[in-house]
Image: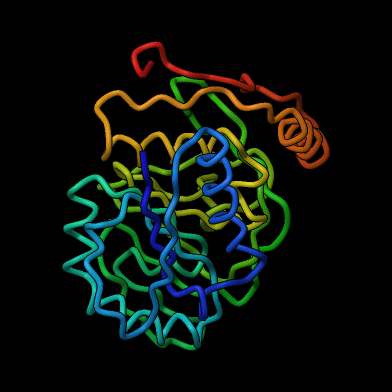
Amino acid sequence: MKLKIGHLYPDLLEIYSDRGNITVLRKRAEWRGIEVQVDRISIGDDVNLVEYDLLFSGGGEDREQMQVAEDLLRKRDTLLRAVASGTVVLAICGSYQLLGHYFETVNGHRIEGVGLLDFYTIGGQRRLTGNVVSKLTIFNFECTVVGYENHSGRTYLGPGVAPLATVVSGHGNNGEDGLEGVVQGTVFGTYLHGPVLAKNPLLADHLLQLALKRRTDRPYLPPLEDEWEWLAHERLVRKFARMKLTCPRRVYNEVDR
């Protein structure tokens, strides 16, 4: 089996080692015998995004966001078709903001998003920074997700989408409503850097399993020997939220076997 991953704008949107998420996805798939092809896609590239099982894009500064926004709008139709076909999307920070209706910077400049999801972002005078611990449900279990945030934007979700997680420690989307990220179907947005998937192996496997559903009706990911990854995750949860790990280390649904 082969998975095809598109890395969007790696030359422009890459802060806090976000590209490490591609490495995590590739290795956790290859360790299970799944071949992975990663293509770099940037401004001006004429590409059919429907060909990809998973699309990833990282964070960047306002200047780079403006450049990317114009090109992403040109790719909007192929992005919408990809999502409709079941392509998984993971967008971090600046890329996350571009999935919504718009991002209005602190200077009042409006960067138009692709409107893929129902939310908008407003720039704030004070940056929201620090380590984050949040909770979300994966494979029908409540799990912890950890990462690092640094953003001036305050994101507000509309009624058409759900938060990815609820904040235990940190700021999240806007520092007000206790929500972090967004999820709708196979589209995921988050402010968490880290890279986030290196710190959260269960979330990485969840995305891989969703991507595999484009290839097979019964996706199954055999367990990995990832004790060190889980020890690192557990230590971060204790350090930043002073709580014990809540999610099981290996969760696989019988229905997917």
Which residue lies at the image location 16% right of the left edge and 68% below the top edge?
Answer: 77
Which residue lies at the image location 51% right of the left edge and 82% below the top edge?
Answer: 62
Q: Nearer the viewer, residue 35 or 200?
A: 35
Which residue lies at the image location 66% right of the left edge and 50% below the top edge?
Answer: 147
Q: Nearer the viewer, residue 69 or 159?
A: 69
Image quadrant where one finds the C terminus: top left
Q: Where 245 falls versus 60 (above or below)?
A: above
Percent from the top left, x then y, of residue 66?
Answer: 41, 85
Percent from the top left, x then y, of residue 86?
Answer: 24, 45
Q: Is residue 80 left or right of residue 144?
A: left
Residue 95: name its quadrant.
Answer: bottom left
Image quadrant where one finds the N terminus: top left
Q: Is residue 59 left or right of residue 43?
A: right
In the image as oriented, which residue stretches furthest toward the top?
254
Q: Where 109 falls versus 89 (above or below)?
A: below
**Color theme of the render:** rainbow
Percent from the top left, x then y, of residue 37?
Answer: 42, 56
Residue 195: name its quadrant.
Answer: bottom right
Q: Nearer the viewer, residue 239 or 227?
A: 227
Which residue lies at the image location 62% right of the left edge and 40% below the top edge?
Answer: 200
Q: Is residue 19 left or right of residue 169?
A: left
